[in-house]
Amino acid sequence: MTSNKNYPEKTGGQQKVRTLADLARIAGVSAGTVSRALAGKSLVNAETRDRIQTLAREHGFRPNQMASKLRSQKTGLIGVVVPLGHEKQQHISDPFFLTLLGQIADELTESGYDVMLRRVIPDDTTDWLDQLSGSGMVDGVIVIGQSDQFDIIESVAEHYHPLTVWGHHTPGQRHCVVGTDNALGGRMAAEHLIACGARSLAFLGTTTGIEIATRYQAAKAVADAAGIPLVHLPIDLAVATMGPQIEKALPECQADGLFAASDLIAMSALRVLHQHGRTVPNDVQIVSFDDLPLASQTMPPLTTIRQEISLGARMLVEKLKARIAGEDTDHFVNAPQLIVRGTTRSAA
Amino acid sequence: MTSNKNYPEKTGGQQKVRTLADLARIAGVSAGTVSRALAGKSLVNAETRDRIQTLAREHGFRPNQMASKLRSQKTGLIGVVVPLGHEKQQHISDPFFLTLLGQIADELTESGYDVMLRRVIPDDTTDWLDQLSGSGMVDGVIVIGQSDQFDIIESVAEHYHPLTVWGHHTPGQRHCVVGTDNALGGRMAAEHLIACGARSLAFLGTTTGIEIATRYQAAKAVADAAGIPLVHLPIDLAVATMGPQIEKALPECQADGLFAASDLIAMSALRVLHQHGRTVPNDVQIVSFDDLPLASQTMPPLTTIRQEISLGARMLVEKLKARIAGEDTDHFVNAPQLIVRGTTRSAA
DNA sequence: CTGAAAGCGCTAACAC
DNA sequence: GTGTTAGCGCTTTCAG
């Protein structure tokens, strides 16, 4: 791109051109014209435009975006924030969120936005969301996961409009949420397990997050109605720590139907069961949640409740753009889908 | 945070406070003083400072970061860019990169930086890196993966200093790279397989990326030296597409020692082998690469070459900060570690 | 300790 | 078409 000797400098050896004004000077025009020329706006002579663009390229000049954005009052940036309220290990590690984040980034890029990513540990602060939305740095905000910050999000949404949130929908809430119908998913999981002959259930996963709590409660209701016991095993959601917990909890558990809060938990359970000589799906059946790409690659492949991650990302971005444009948007609660693979026997 | 009736507005019902000047007016001081007060600088009367801070809180006022950053010439932002040069499906999906990204975000947050995340498809453009580094939006840039953009990164590094890159180290290169010693890793994998009794090897993974190519070549050299055949099965790295490819390629392959380019490939191979009635590690042994958290949760758990992701993230950030401070930094090539688990038999 | 003034680098009326 | 003029909202000398 640049050879060693041939730096993008005026042959005469002037100092680097850093501003519009610099370029304007050596082009013999005004700063305004350079601005217009570089922006490719029509209101400029084609010839001068080309000349200026060439000059800019030669000198490796690029307009300062900070100044541009300040002046034009459009940042072209979307804040994406992951609140780590109830996470035991406070890091962005959940593969589901990470995948969602990747897709959101893709969607935003497609729409010409840049992503300002922020991790936040809300423990000590109550204004993490205001801080971002009110910073003047972003045109809008996407929150990945409500964590235990529902009320704060709610209160910010009251006066800050360009905001969408991945998470759980509570009737009557104000903030625009997109997510999965976790109650339906929980119901489907329990029903499928029971239909496949399970007679004693266990739910694997901590229920501190509202989404997972909802899955559990729905499953519990189904089990109760069917007169089937369901025990709750509060397994940590982080891959790093779930292993030992499952090794401890599972052997003592007599359930023949497992509902895992995530594919990863199911995967780990698969391993522990095998080590204890219990076969899946013959001795124990499992239904999990998410349907991450790896769900189909386990042994046996996971029967799981699929959340449409890419659809979620698309909706999050689509609705955010609408809100930035001043429109109002409705929630989007997607019905999950039961994907039957190898960890359950066929239903009668 | 805010009750319904008690909006952060002057009781009298003045319009919203948007600027320093606004706040200054109602505080009866000058904008400069407000700026100093809010910044917590010492050169301001404690009493007025408190008064102004209280006022700011009451009115929900926050200084515009765009303006602040422009004026102070420090953005507090680090650009993190993922070039998707040779990826088949051009999305940020690789769990290794995603995990690395998460850790980098954590590290940067810890250091008080915000992350500007950018995905880039370099196919059509040659100035993607200049565009970011020269935008005036970031204080520094981290590139996650060189993809096939080695030369471009190299040329930018020549004149842009605050830049660190995750990837492969080529002797004599200019850009500051941190990564794993892939040659060593490849060697360790092949040697371990052979030491455990494998007599015919296969490498699973496409070698378009330089990191994986290096792993392959190192393994190949070891195999050649030992007089053991090694075939190359160019399996796609994306979870979504690798499954079918492995199902197709593996049954035709007679190797009793598999070197998988990633844990995910190994996991998928595990499944396919099982479906064909071949047991691991008795019939076939596997060594993979990465040691993602899930590597210990498969059945059997993976013997794998561990890359220290969090160390990598830390170095990437640490060196970047040094470079922002004007220092020069050396490369950091970390020796990977062989983690022996259940997919290989014990070495004689 | 505080106010006034001068920009950071760019864009967008408004003239010519 | 292009130059001129005013700022975007903030920080930071420089006086006092």
Image: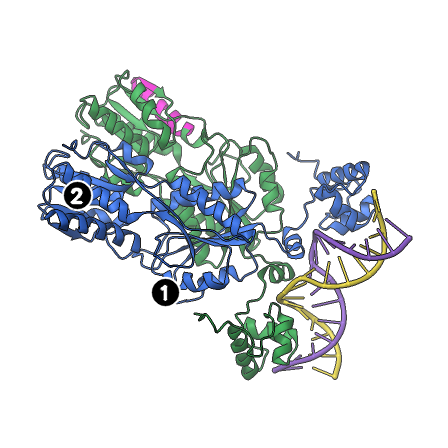
Chain colours: A green, B blue, C yellow, D purple
What secondary structure characterizes most of the magenta part?
A: helix
Q: Secondary structure at mark 1?
A: loop
Residue at 13% across, 46% down: B201
In front: label 1 or label 2: 2
Residue at the spot of label 2: B258
Tell me the kind of residue under disc 1: Asp
Q: Position of residue B229 (x, y in %)?
A: 10, 49
In the picture, which quadrant includes the C terminus of chain B?
top left
Of residues A139 and D12, the one nearer the viewer is D12
Q: In the displayed structure, does residue A248 sit left or right of residue B270? A: right
Chain to which the residue tagged by mark 2 belongs = B
Residue at 32% across, 30% down: A265
Mark 1 or mark 2: name the one nearer the start of the chain.
1
In the picture, which quadrant includes the N terminus of chain B?
top right
Residue at the spot of label 1: B123
Q: Secondary structure at mark 2?
A: strand
Q: Is residue B333 magenta?
A: no
Tell me the kind of residue under disc 2: Leu
Q: In the displayed structure, does residue B312 sit left or right of residue A7? A: left
Which quadrant holds residue A196? top left
Q: Position of residue A40 (x, y in %)?
A: 54, 73
Same subunit, labels 1 and 2: the answer reads yes
Q: Position of residue B158 (x, y in %)?
A: 47, 63
- Residue B64 vertical position relative to residue A280 in the rendered view, above or below: below
- Residue B60 vertical position relative to residue B139 in the rendered view, above or below: above
Query: How many numbered marks, from 0 up?
Result: 2
Residue at 63% across, 46% down: A134
- Badge 2 density bin: few <14, some 14–19, many ≥20, Cα 10 Å: many
Q: In the displayed structure, does residue A345 sit left or right of residue A261? A: left
- Badge 1 density bin: few <14, some 14–19, many ≥20, Cα 10 Å: few
| Residue bounds of the magenta highlight | A213-231
